Amino acid sequence: MIPLWWYLILSAALFSIGLFGALARKNAVAILLGIELMLNAVNINLVSFWRYNDPTRIDGQVFAIIVFAVAAAEVAVGLALVISVYRRRNTVVADEIDLMKW
Amino acid sequence: MTVAQIIFLITAAVILGSAAMVVTTRNLVHAALWLIVTLFGAAVLFAMLNAGFIAVVQVVVYIGAIAILFIFAVMLTRREMNDTGPGLNKGWWLSAVTSALTFGGLVWLLQGWDGLSKVAPALGSEFDAIGALANALVSPEAYVLPFEVASVLLLAALVGAVYIAFQRKGEE
Amino acid sequence: MDFWTDPVEAAGEWLSGIFVGWGMNADAAHVLAAFVGILVLISVVMVLDIFLVWTERKIVARFQDRIGPNRLGPFGLVQPFADIIKLIIKENIYPVGVDKIVYNLAPIIMMTSVLLLWAVLPLTEFLGLDLNVGVLYLIGVGALGTLSIIMAGWSSNNKYALLGAFRQVAVMISYEIPMVVALLIPTILSGSMGINSIVAAQESSWYIVLAPLAFLLFLISATAELGRAPFDLTEAESELIAGHHIEYSGMKFGLFYASELLHTFTFGGFIAAFFFGGWQGPWVSEIPALGLLYFLAKATVGYWLFGWIKYTMPRIRIDKMMDLNWKFLVPFSFVLLMYVALMNALLAGFRATEGAMWIYTWGMFLSNILLGWITLEILRRRAHGERVKVEGAVVEAGHH
């Protein structure tokens, strides 16, 4: 049987990789890719806690489904913003989108 | 080593390797394709955790919709077919340190917890996870309100995405 | 385990018994036996695919008033093998600027996405996994097909391939919505998402009778999902040359072609399973193996239906096709879903009582016909109004 901490370590590692991607990438689309990795790490955590605690309490799976909905909404709006910025400024590099910088 | 453990280790290696490729590959279409590999690995893990519904929804939503959206966005926002220049910004080592610290901190936090070596309780043969999930999502005592709010959120995101990305007539 | 009631299970146990006899771990032997089973199923399916090429060419020939392949072997049956030899010995060409790994992976994923569907296809009562999320699995595997098309289109480094892939992916994502809703209706009627359970629930009446509109909806969206005429925008020979597989030749093209045919046959099988009772038929309860025959016969009819549509209809323009989906099929499918669920709940009492089953069946059928008639009437009025508007404008333009 697989002990719980295997899943937890895996999801911690996946979360850290996603965090690195979200912080270090230049391209705005790549930053969103990193955020997706982080959301997936959270989902692995939620589902494994559901399985390893009391499977008759379904809360973990419900949370995972709500995370799916949030991820879909985030990607739709995020990518629409990226495309809109690209149309106006002809760039998707996060460093060059600096109109709000002072 | 049981068969399940071997499958878990292979899947974990695939997930972490492809996740590393997602954040380091210069070619963004390749990064999106590697993301699909990662998501698929996560779906395998969900299946191993007896969450069949979550596993299939993962494939439908993430691979069928989100990953495809990413690939579309990458293709719509490129000046030429080949990427040039570094994919990481100048302070990338700072980000590496931050994420390494996050990982270390999480592992340190986990170490102090006593539920680590828990094994999964057996599922009764009569237990129907999908039925329980469906009941939880629509029963007023459980999650009907968050579920409805999530649907409103999706609708708002849909309208917002169309509004933001819509090219009005007269705009170049 | 009796061989005649459940031959697959019996064969699996026999095989893993042999592996254990060789000194293997019981778990590993079970996994290995399952792999052997998968290999056997895939081999049978691929051989079936070879003959589908012949069937397809014969069908199109008959529709176009030709004879079709008739030289090699009896009725030209050996022709597909000649085709395969030709495809295999063709030169392996890489166009300039292709992304080699993605380019080679795309046809493989395409074929895989079709073969994965056979895992849940209920060939008989005992063959075919009764996955409790079977209907969703069907949609999820379809997502892999979408992915392979965009991979092929992007990696070919050709603008026609990319345009074709974009169009096809947009179409597939859009038509997935009415398809999911259409599949929810058998799910509601049977109370299960397992495809084999859906088939088992059709013992008294097929769902084509209980939900004819859901069948039409599924047929339309499946045609779009398969990328076959009138929705073959990815091919569009006259505008896009061949869409996403323009740069493919040899066996890689062969995989796309074979997977399209097999995909169509598989969807014929799903139509049989969801709406025509799958392996249900006379004497099936006595001889379960007879179900395989019934299923294959019904799947072939479904396959022929797709061929009939393909060779009869002209291609639809992309914007019209999107209009059809978003302005008609999606709202209609939501209305239909709620309507069928409501009727099913209202008539559930008749289903439970002995001898009143016919009221339930006829009630469902007639209520579906009523909804279809109302929809057609609304569409007719609307079309009439549009025509009056256009013709009025023409008349006015003639005056000035």
Image (spheres, coloured by chain):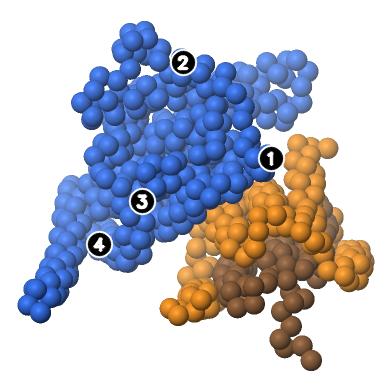
The residue mark sitting in front, 4 or 3, is: 3
N-term-proximal mark, 4 vs 3 = 3
> What residue is disc 3 on?
C221
Q: Is mark 4 on a helix, strand or loop?
A: helix
CA gap between label 4 and label 1 equals 52 Å
The lab-note entry on whether marks 4 and 2 share a chain reads yes
| Residue toward you, B168 or C13 | B168
Q: Quadrant of residue B58?
A: bottom right
> What residue is disc 2 on?
C81
Chain coloured orange: B
Chain coloured brown: A
CA gap between label 3 and label 2 equals 32 Å
Assess whether mark 3 and mark 4 are in contact (beta carbons under 8 angstroms).
Answer: no
Q: Is residue B133 left or right of residue C188?
A: right
Give the amino acid at mark 4: Met
CA gap between label 4 and label 2 equals 51 Å
CA gap between label 4 and label 3 equals 24 Å
| Residue toward you, C107 or C140 | C107
N-term-proximal mark, 4 vs 2 = 2
